[in-house]
Image (cartoon, rainbow, N blue to C red):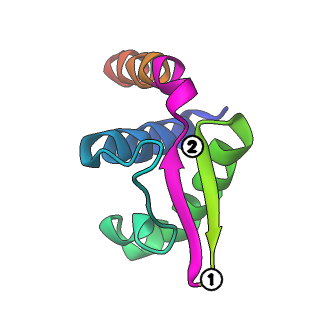
Amino acid sequence: MGGRDSGLMAQLLEKMIYHGWIGGKHTSADNLPKSFPRHARDKVKKALKQLVGLGFIVVKPTSYGKELSINPRAVKEIKQFILEQRKEYLK
């Protein structure tokens, strides 16, 4: 994982944990990039795809779009990932 992308992924995961979007509670895939600057939204969408690939985020398809939540089985690894990214940022 690249440095900038990893930092962005950590930000996304922190936001989802803060809001409690874990397991059964989810949010629209269209809403997550809205809190980031417009020029970074494409990177946010790519980071979300990477997080899905890593198994950190679960996608729930619905009739009105994709809903995302944190994989409850990966919370421990996610918290470790966030801590590692914070340490990397503070170097």
What's the CA distance linking mark 1 and mark 2?
Answer: 30 Å
The magenta stretch spans which residues?
64-78
What residue lies at 53% left-to-right and 19% top-to-bottom? 77
Residue 73 in magenta stretch: yes
Q: Earlier in the sequence, mark 1 or mark 2?
A: 2
Query: Closer to us: mark 1 or mark 2?
Result: 1
Which quadrant, please, contains the N terminus? Answer: top right
Left or right of 12, for residue 17: left
What residue lies at 47% left-to-right and 45% top-to-bottom? 8
Name the one closer to the observer, 49 or 8.
Answer: 49
- Mark 2 crowd level (few <14, some 14–19, many ≥20, 10 Å Cα): some
Q: Quadrant of residue 56?
A: top right
Residue at far right of view: 53
* Amino acid beneath label 1: Ser
- Mark 1 crowd level (few <14, some 14–19, many ≥20, 10 Å Cα): few
Q: Considering only vertical position in the picture, is 71 above or below 85?
A: below
> Residue 69 appears at what percent x and percent y?
49, 50
> Residue 43 appears at what percent x and percent y?
57, 60
Residue at far bottom of view: 64
Q: Considering only vertical position in the picture, is 30 above or below 85?
A: below
User: Disc 1 designates what residue?
Assistant: 63
Residue 29 in magenta stretch: no
User: Disc 2 designates what residue?
Assistant: 5
Classify mark 2: helix, strand or loop: helix
Q: Considering only vertical position in the picture, is 45 above or below 80?
A: below
> Residue 40 appears at what percent x and percent y?
47, 65
